[in-house]
Amino acid sequence: MPSTPAVLSVSESVPVMPSWLVFFLACVCGLIVANIYYAQPLIGPIARTLGMSASAAGLIVTLTQLGYVVGLLFLVPLGDLFENRKLAITVMSVSAVGLLACSLASSPGLFLGASLLVGLGSVTVQILVPYAAHLAPEAMRGRVVGNVMSGLMLGIMLSRPVASFITDLSSWRVVFVLSFGLMVILALLLRRLLPPRPVHAKLHYGELLASMLQLALHTPVLQRRGLYHACMFAAFSLFWTTVPLLLAGPLFGLSDIGIALFALAGVAGAVAAPLAGRVADRGWTRAATAFALLSASAAFLLTHLGTLGSGFSLGCLVAAAILLDFAVSANLVLGQRVIFTLNPAYRARLNGLYMATFFCGGAFGSAVSTYIFTAYGWQITSLVGMLFPALAFVYFLTERRG
């Protein structure tokens, strides 16, 4: 293991962030964020084991997401008050406790409470991303953030199929046991490898929270980028909530393993994150944002090609999944690159607000998707999905150049 500081200097003014550290942070973020999504494809087996009703089983995802939003608003901003490495390890320990409790749960109430802790502690990733932006020099900040976010996006996209495969081979409890072990190992590695990032803020916690309201109300670029991605994440959540229902239905009749393999195809879209970071570093954020928003709408149009249930239609759905994931990954990194150019003293708070804004969009997309799909079928559902990024693009057209 390196014994020298992780951030070196080739001159007095040009810091260099080692590639191994960027790769390490990308892996850590991917493994942590996956904790939010492991339970989504396992709701059925978990409910049967614990004797949960259908309505109670639906709370598993809801409480995990609720914990994450609470963490974004009340824990992530602490990155502007406390040393980042210790804060990340402390918050991650909360998710480790939650994962262990999930694996041992023998009652619905215990599992639901543990799910809340898993979501709360998983906001560690949003402490580490601004941390990485702080370590990176301005000229390569977009590239570094993009590379770290590619790991995060891979974690989101791989978590569901991985959980399904492990459960198919053993038990859903094994998924949570393995992730608990990974969190313990990661905590030790973070303590050993990350350089400290001391913070010299003089705010009290109450003042910190009050300042977040002021930032939300008086930072136009944060409002704009947050709304862009809220629409994108609503489309993303709608697609990935309803497509498994479509594929499992009578038109396609895919098995759980088949749906898991389909989900793996979307992983290809994660390559957009590092590419978007490099594009942003070159000053092409505006053009790249337009491309991402239009690509997301085009992804839903692809699903209307061919007759549903045919091999050609399935191929179009795969292409749509890749294109949508590509567009969402790119737009996420473009937004973070923009807000990280603002005052470094506010980075954790800005990131927390940005994430909380678009996460609410994702929750809305998930909430309406199953109702629309059940009532009107895939054709109308996909048109609604296309509408979200289309509205964001119309709003984008009002953005002033420069």
Image (spheres, rainbow, N blue to C red):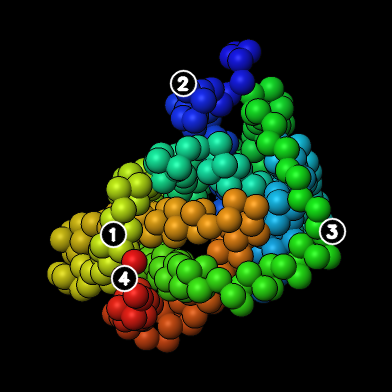
Counting residues from the start of the chain, the first of labels 1 and 2 encountered is: 2
Counting residues from the start of the chain, the first of labels 2 and 3 encountered is: 2
Q: Which residue is mark 3?
A: 204
Cα distance, mark 2 to mark 3? 37 Å
Number of residues whose C-alpha sits closer than 10 Å to that of mark 1, classed few (under 14), some (14–19) or many (20 or more): some
Cα distance, mark 1 to mark 2? 32 Å
- Residue 131 spot, x, y in % from top left: 60, 42
Counting residues from the start of the chain, the first of labels 3 and 4 encountered is: 3
The kind of residue tagged 4 is Arg
The kind of residue tagged 3 is His
Q: Quadrant of the N terminus?
A: top right
Asked which secondary structure carries label 1, the reply is: helix
The kind of residue tagged 1 is Ala
Q: Nearer the viewer, residue 74 or 338?
A: 338
Number of residues whose C-alpha sits closer than 10 Å to that of mark 4, classed few (under 14), some (14–19) or many (20 or more): few
CB under 8 Å between callouts 2 and 3? no
Counting residues from the start of the chain, the first of labels 1 and 3 encountered is: 3
Q: Which residue is mark 4?
A: 401
Number of residues whose C-alpha sits closer than 10 Å to that of mark 3, classed few (under 14), some (14–19) or many (20 or more): few
**Residue at horizontal 70 percent and vertical 49 percent from the top:** 79
Cα distance, mark 3 to mark 4? 37 Å
In the rendering, which numbered label is found on residue 288?
Answer: 1
Q: Which residue is mark 2?
A: 10
The kind of residue tagged 2 is Val
Counting residues from the start of the chain, the first of labels 1 and 4 encountered is: 1
